[in-house]
Amino acid sequence: MNRPHNKSTDSIERLVEAGVALLGATGRGGVTVRAVAAQAGLSVAAVQHHFPTKERLLDAVYAEALARDAAASLAMTRVLGMAPGTLGAARRVLSGLLAINCGAAAPRTAARNEALLGCARQQGSHRHVRRWRARRLAGLTELVTGLTAKPRRAARLLLELLVGLEVLSLGCREQPLTPQLNEEVLDHILNAAFGERRHCQPDWLGPIVEEAVSEERAQRARAPAGRDRGTRARVLDAAARVLCEQGATALNHRSVARQADLVVSAVGYYFPTKANLLFGTFQHIRGEITRFSLDTNPEPQQPFPRALVDLRFGEAPAYLGMLEAVISAATDTGLRDFAWRTRLLRGVYHLRVEQPENFPFSPAAFDRFAFANWSTGATLLAQAGWPKHCVASLLHMRLARMNEYLPA
């Protein structure tokens, strides 16, 4: 039976609708009481009447964003996959989902990603993620039934892969090579996971990665030296802690200066804009993961670097700060170059930048690249859907299992 509508119900729906629209267009930082009221055409008092705290408003917005994504993606999976039965048919369905979710439905996907990250920050919101995940898994399980003896396990891997590719793609969706790159990674992991012939890395990708490596090295060469370098490192350590513990919405010159016990102008000297600060902080976290990984495991051939899970800044895992930065790129035009360059270096950063003489961009490097694309989704879903004390052990298990498919 349909629920009877009244003025109060209509107002709540308008407010939540406005919140979801803002979430996809401006990120979590744009979902304020005033912005939601203006978007919905209602007063601030109306928002506060229905949602006494901002946390309750965000909780409702996250739940709606996840529910919409689940319903739309499940419907598209079933429409695109009317007669699967083969790996090729399943691949076409997944390619179609990626194309739609990163193209025409990008605002919905961006809102979904922000909601997942918001739920990772709000411990009481795991139930929304689990409901969303159950619906998404149902569609993917139907898709791969008959292709493997363990369809639910395969569906979970595919969900993590799709989310990872969508998170990484939205910030650089205007880059013309993004769809092709997604196709290559999707095809590579499907071939590995379902036991078919594995292909080598795409020929066209190597030179583009080389260009990104050159840009990265040039930027590193311009970094300050001497005393300035020490102060800059202090700023970046503080920024990494703010980003990992509090999120991209809390990252600004004032919060970093307070964390580093410096004046605001000192932060602005090294990073004139927030985009510069976010970009630099991401690079710093990635570099620290590399150093931590090489210190704890001097053999870089190991496929799964435990640093991805174990390294922390303050009370938060390092990967959470990296997720914050990448997801922010979807709604911040100043981060477009950042999104594409970091996408190209994902998984092969320390092989190509730190030790370039030993590791050409080979099929093994593409294995690591594909692994890192998948792990982006795996870390986000684990952080968003499980209590804090379970996440590290869950991720160690998930990433170790993925090594069976991509041993690199």
Image: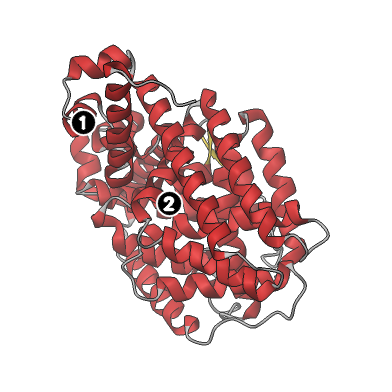
Which picture quadrant has residue 222? bottom left
At horizontal 22% and vertical 32% (from top left) the residue drawn is 263
Of tags 1 and 2, the one toward the viewer is 1
Residue under the point 50% across and 45% down:
71
Q: CA distance from mark 1 to mark 2?
A: 40 Å
The vertical placement of 381 against 300, above or below, is above
Asked which colour scheme the image uses, the reply is secondary structure
Task: Decide: few, some or many residues near mark 2? Use Cα within 10 Å; few <14, some 14-19, many ≥20.
Answer: some
Q: Which amino acid, by three-letter code, is at mark 2?
A: His
Name the residue at the front extreme.
1
Residue displayed at 50% across by 69% down? 182
Contact, mark 1 vs mark 2 (Cβ under 8 Å) = no
Circle on res. 105: none
For residue 312, say whether it is visible: yes
State the residue position of label 2. 284
- The answer to whether residue 297 is left or right of residue 170 is right
Instruction: Reply above or below: 198 against 153.
Output: below
Residue that label 1 marks: 40
Give the image location of residue 184, x and y in percent: 55, 75
Which SS class for mark 1? helix
In x, y percent, where is residue 43? 16, 20
Observer able to see residue 369:
no
Q: Left or right: 152 with respect to 277?
A: right
Q: Is residue 256 left or right of residue 376?
A: left
Q: Quadrant of residue 258?
A: top left
Q: How many C-alpha atoms fall within 10 Å of the one at disc 1: few (<14), some, or many (≥20)?
A: some
The image quarter in which residue 303 lies: bottom right
Where, quadrant-wise, is the C terminus in this rendering? Answer: bottom right
Q: Earlier in the sequence, mark 1 or mark 2?
A: 1
Mark 2, secondary structure of its residue: helix
Q: Is residue 236 left or right of residue 180?
A: left
